[in-house]
Amino acid sequence: LEIEARLRSAMARGHLLLHYQPQLSVATGRIVGAEALLRWNDPEEGLISPARFIPVAETSGVIGPLGQWVMQEACRQGQAWRAAGLPAVRLAVNVSPRQFQLDDMAVCAAQALAASGLPAHCLELELTESVLAERPEEMRQVLQRLRELGVRIAVDDFGTGYSSLVHLKRFPIDVLKIDQGFMRDIPASGDDMAISATIIAMGRSLGLNVLAEGVETPEQLAFLRERGCDSYQGYLFSRPVPAEQFARLLQAQA
Ligand code: G
Ligand code: G
Ligand code: MN
Ligand code: NA
């Protein structure tokens, strides 16, 4: 079977699932969010990485229904945790450029929120810089409607894309996610420390939240604390984990 058809059938049979990576406050160490990361559990191949099938989904157009499913499932799970009395967390969902072209993200988000009952301020959409660069006027309008709904917007992989600082001024953005490539060689690399510190300082002066990705060591976390970074995610605290395991992490800090 061709991969596109397999992907559609995997969706229909419930072979797709989300893992969740905790996002923590640097200041308090508490879990403040969960990034939803898509997984394909194939009966024969086992877990297949999104790096392998998202590109196929994008070229084939399957990304439309797939992206809608991800948003609905993340909202459903977020609301289920709330209903179970667990501490409230924000759900961060990745949105690909192609998905943004195919569907109106404000409509998708409104539908997923209405269907699940999750409050809008608990949903965050992660976009890459390249999404913002394409058709900026249309993008600004969609982001404005998301903002009016109360949904938060994060720029993913910040600092690596085809980026322009003018985007930060033109678009209603709430969060900058410092790309994990900048964390990797901290504290060995003075350049990476300077770049990260600059992103944190810029985000703060623009009134944005800054989250560091790919935090793997206590030294990296100490650096972020010293620089006043708001939040972080990475293997230091946890890999992306299944929903049940994420619930146990939340429970442990209730
Ligand atoms: O979780 P992992 O490191 O395997 O993710 C690999 C890549 O797949 C990352 O770039 C991540 O942003 C992307 N990805 C994971 N889940 C989704 C999703 O639901 N939608 C889109 N568009 N990308 C995703
Ligand atoms: O493109 P995006 O930032 O959405 O991709 C997130 C990816 O980064 C996920 O595939 C996730 O598994 C991976 N990831 C999360 N934390 C770490 C980390 O601490 N180190 C490394 N190397 N990868 C990480
Ligand atoms: Mn992401
Ligand atoms: Na990222």
Image (cartoon, grey):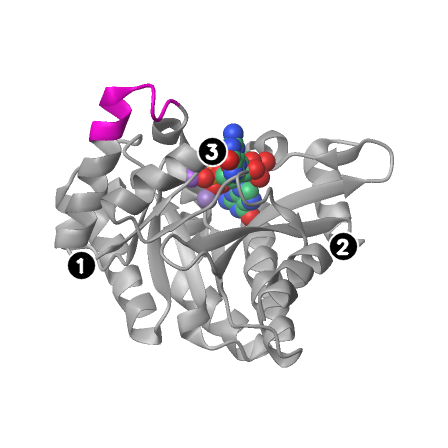
Magenta part of the protein: which range? 185-194
Label 2 with label 3: CB-CB less than 8 Å: no
Closer to the observer: label 3 or label 1? Answer: 3
Callout 1: few (<14), some (14-19), or many (20+) C-alpha neighbours within 10 Å? few
At which x and y percent is residue 158? 31, 38
Would you say residue 191 sits in the magenta stretch?
A: yes
Q: Which residue is mark 1?
A: 207
* Mark before the other along the chain sequence, 2 or 3: 2
Callout 2: few (<14), some (14-19), or many (20+) C-alpha neighbours within 10 Å? few
The residue at 52%/79% (across/down) is 114
The residue at 20%/53% (across/down) is 137
* Mark before the other along the chain sequence, 2 or 1: 2
- Label 3 near ligand 2 (CB < 8 Å): no
Q: CA distance from mark 3 to mark 1?
A: 27 Å
At label 2, the amino acid type is Ala
Q: Which residue is mark 2?
A: 12
At numbered mark 2, what does the secondary structure look like: helix, strand or loop? helix
* Mark before the other along the chain sequence, 3 or 1: 1
Would you say residue 186 sits in the magenta stretch?
A: yes
Q: Is residue 206 left or right of residue 173?
A: left
Q: Quadrant of the C terminus?
A: bottom right
At which x and y percent is residue 69? 61, 58
On screen, residue 174 above or below 51: below
Q: Which mark is residue 217?
A: 3
On screen, residue 81 above or below 57: below
At numbered mark 3, what does the secondary structure look like: helix, strand or loop? loop
At label 1, the amino acid type is Gly
